[in-house]
Amino acid sequence: MDDHVITDVNQVIELWSKTYNSEGKPDWSHILPYYDEDILFRDSIQELRGIDEFKSMTERLAKRSKELKMRIVRAIMEQNIVFVEWEMTILFKKTRTSVLYGTSRLLLSEKGKIVEQRDYYDLWGDIFDNIPGFRRMYRRFMRKKFG
């Protein structure tokens, strides 16, 4: 029997909390065995399938960021769906610190593996809010065009 299965929401909180260590560099090695080989991952900028592609994405994110931390705000589990609300603090190599606010929806297989992960967040708004002088212009544009 595979020991790497998701069984409850507290396990999810513990796994995600370990991903972002105190030095700020993320390490997904402990959590990758909980993903299905055919994982479908989607977020605001990409869609990919398969554990190898997912692992490559996590490595790119770690390489691009000088520091990356995540705070789990809350998590709930209903049958085979888990929602995780989070705040990610990221420091890219050439910019100031940005906080991204988001949610991840995890779909679990009957075997307890993560077969789908969809991350929801406002990438550009959260980053642009931290660029002096650009925040107001961006928010004004968004209100005019979309709000």
Image (spheres, rainbow, N blue to C red):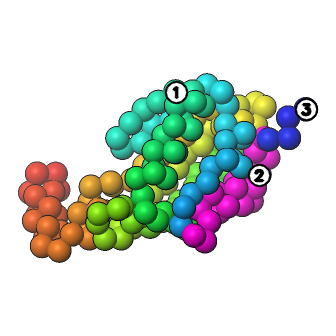
Q: Say which element carries label 3.
A: loop
**What residue does disc 1 label?**
49
Residue mark closest to the camera, 2 vs 1: 1
Callouts 3 and 2 close, C-beta under 8 Å: no
Q: Outermost residue toward the bottom?
A: 132
In the figure, residue 39 lies in which quadrant? top right
Query: Could you say whether the residue bearing mark 2 is in a helix, strand or loop?
Result: loop
Q: Position of residue 48 (x, y in %)?
A: 47, 30
Q: Earlier in the sequence, mark 3 or mark 2?
A: 3
Residue 8's tag is 2
Measure the alpha-carbon separation of dots 3 and 1.
Answer: 25 Å
Q: Secondary structure at mark 1?
A: strand
Q: Earlier in the sequence, mark 2 or mark 1?
A: 2
Q: CA distance from mark 2 to mark 1?
A: 25 Å
- The x, y position of residue 35, in whole percent, is 67, 37
Which quadrant of the figure contains the N terminus? top right
Amino acid on which disc 2 is placed: Asp
Crowding near the residue tagged with mark 1, few <14, some 14–19, many ≥20 C-alpha atoms within 10 Å: some
How many residues crowd mark 2 within 10 Å: few (<14), some (14–19), many (20+)?
some
Residue drawn at x 52%, y 49% is 104
Where is mark 3, residue-wise?
A: 1
Identify the magenta region: 5-23
